[in-house]
Image (cartoon, rainbow, N blue to C red):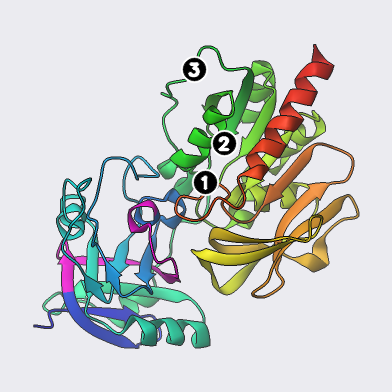
Amino acid sequence: MLNAVLVLQDGRRFLGKSVGKKGKCMGEVCFTTGMTGYQHTITDPSFADQIITFTFPHIGNIGVNHEDNEGKKIFASGVVVRGISSASHCSSYVSLNDWLEENNVIGISGIDTRALTRYLRKHGSQNGMICSLNEVHTLEELQSYQSINGMGITNKVSLSNSLKNDASAKYKVVIVDFGVKISIISRLIELGCTIELIKPDEGFAKKILNINPDGIVLSNGPGDPQEIGDNIISELDMIVRSKIPIFGICMGHQLLAITLGAKTIKMDVGHRGSNHPVYNINSGRVEITSQNHGFVVDSASLPNSIEVTHVSLFDNSIEGIMMKNHPIFSVQYHPEEAPGTHDSHYLFENFVDNVKLYKMKSA
């Protein structure tokens, strides 16, 4: 029984069945190509204010567990799937459908997600609305929808600074939290780092420098980096000039590039999934990576102080940069592999090597 509809801002409609909570939601409609890791994806803070379309046809077969959340709650506006499966894994405590309903997430199933994906690839990303067929909705309402792209969305997704750190950890690392994934924190702790989260509010650079960390991570997060950057570039510039080792991931990569003089541009459909090939220019190796971004660094805007280290094998867009004279580097993708492969774990190790060297010189 068809009882829900996905409406795009250009008027295209896809009929389906309601899943999760019944009601109405709006957001940017995007698609992710990962075959696994739907719980990681739905709880990734970078998906705030977006409607996630899963291209893999069977979603929900292992249910939902207590281990795979990447944020403090679900920030995605809605979920689109071809079919929702019954949970059948021993680690599951609730089905995907019930979990979505309990967390007030609106979804739709039973639509042709391949047709939707092809449509978005042809016409570009756009806002959309999921609602029940008996729900009052107008195309004008959707066309006037504006997502929160500035600091408002960053403040909404940031974690609280209540981490369980190892007292014997060797290195003190500050994470500037634009919407950090829990797995990024876990990878750093595994490598001997004690973590302090700092929200990117007014004066955060001085807070960080007063902590005197051995290294700084600029985290992932949602929104338009150019809008967010207007408020914090001067703060990030203070951090860069301190010459403390910096590692930027996704949004952190984009904001670092802006701070160093580059610009970012909006992509037509973005890169989202756990199967994206990236070429490492220095090693000559190909990494299969996890990605979730709708903006990229404009290659034409790069200053001479930046060297490109990684590029996408899909469209040759910039996937990694480094400063030529300082221990500062960043990548557009997600090396923490949640979900995804372990191909890029070495980036955390490279960062910790920089941290170790900096701490030795500062002793």
Instruction: Tell me if residue 71 can be seen.
Output: yes
Q: Answer few, some or many: residues within 10 Å of disc 3's Cα (few below 14, many 20 plus, some between 14 and 19).
A: few
Callout 3 amino acid: Asp
Q: State yes or no: discs 1 and 2 in contact (Cβ < 8 Å).
A: yes
Which residue is labeled 3 in the image? Answer: 166
- Of 252 and 129, nearer the camera is 252
Mark 1–mark 2 distance (CA, rounded to whole Å): 9 Å
- Image spot of residue 70 (x, y percent): 40, 44
Which residue is rendered at x = 67% and y = 21% of the image? Answer: 213
Q: Circle 1 is placed at which residue position? A: 151
**Magenta-colored stretch includes residue 37:** yes
Which residue is labeled 2 in the image?
200
What whole-number distance in Å separates the C-alpha atoms at marks 1 and 3? 31 Å
- Amino acid type, callout 1: Met
Viewer can see residue 235: no
Estimate the x, y position of residue 254 in percent, counting from the top left.
Answer: 66, 53
